[in-house]
Image (tube, rainbow, N blue to C red):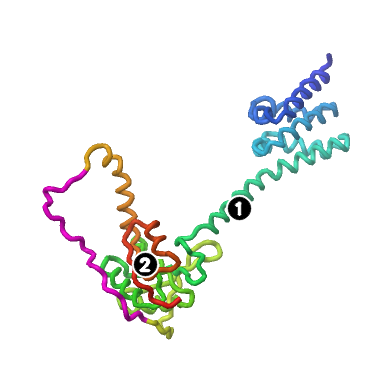
Amino acid sequence: MSAEMDALTVVNQLRDLAADPLNRRAIVEDQGCLPGLILFLDHPNPQVVYSALLAVRYLAECRANREKMKGELGMMLSLQNVMQKSTSPGETKLLASEIYEILQSAGKEEAEKAEAAAASCRRKAHFFLGSNNKRAKTVVLHIDGLDDSTRRSLCEEALLKIRGVISFTFQMAVKRCVVRIRSDLKAEALGTAINSTKVLMAQQVVKTEDGGELMVPFQEDSAVVVEENTDIPDYLPEDESPSQEQDKAVTRVGSITDGMGWLSTAANFLSRSFYCIVAAPDDKLSEEFSAKFSGESRVLDPIWDD
């Protein structure tokens, strides 16, 4: 048996194995099969070359193989040589061109899938539940001077006086306040109210086209009329009543409390990081907040007419 017949026999066996979808991953992962097929693409016998191309085409039908096949040493160059060789039959050139295009688009498909997944995540990323409500909008404020609970209380009072404010959440670590307001209320009204405290200075945080953030200061001379709430109910005292008979407090001991330690730590962190005020119910917003936030929330009577 000649060397050419031996090569044809071997490549035909590989082709028959590759025709079975269950074998395709194993052939590509094997350290010798794929490099051997690439060598057969440069064989002087046109039948060996065509049979090797058929095997490669079968292997490329498995999407999981394409990236590895494209990166295999000599694969893309050998396919180009077959396409450009003047002695290659037309059918062989067409098959080599088809395989080349499939492997060439492998990286692009992965990139497009990743971009589509990222775009889908961006569309779904909403800070507030019910953020698609057309009657309301969200404004993010960066507030210089928002350093402690005293300044936070001052900012609360300023925002609660504005008619049309639905809720707001403080992020003390980054000096920000995310405010949910009626769609007909201008963001400048928030800046005017906060800046009137004389110790706080608010800027609006807006998203740029490239996904970055831009701080937009409010105009000091802007004549924005702020409609104030006049009937705001008094809050209950925030300080908890001291526990009496401290020496008789009861607590669980053992593995149950030990296992819950990390959960308590996480809950305390969220409570310190997010301080939420719900100024008025909006599409069951108060129910959503109680489900979403473990921190403090306050609910008032409705402050505007539907």
Quadrant housing residue 56: top right
Element under disc 2? strand
Q: Is the residue 157 above or below the residue 129 in the image?
A: below
Tell which of 278 and 287 is nearer to you: 287
Q: Position of residue 245 (x, y in %)?
A: 11, 52
Name above or below for residue 275 compared with residue 184: above
- Report the magenta residues as a range: 228-251
Q: Main secondary structure of the magenta part?
A: loop
Residue named by callout 1: 116
Quadrant of the drawing holding the C terminus: bottom left
Q: Residue at the location (17% across, 60% down)?
A: 241
Residue 136 to residue 211: above or below = below
User: What residue is drawn where x is 35% and y is 63%?
Assistant: 276
Amino acid type of the residue tagged 2 in the rendering: Val
- Number of marks in picture: 2
In-image side of 120 versus 303 (left or right): right
Q: Position of residue 263 (x, y in %)?
A: 32, 46
Q: Where on the picture, by quarter, is residue 71?
A: top right
Does 151 sit left or right of 241 as displayed? Answer: right
- For badge 1, the amino acid type reads Ala
The residue that disc 2 covers is 278
Chain-order first, disc 1 or disc 2: 1
Q: Nearer the viewer, residue 209 or 63?
A: 63
- Residue 140 falls within the magenta-colored stretch: no
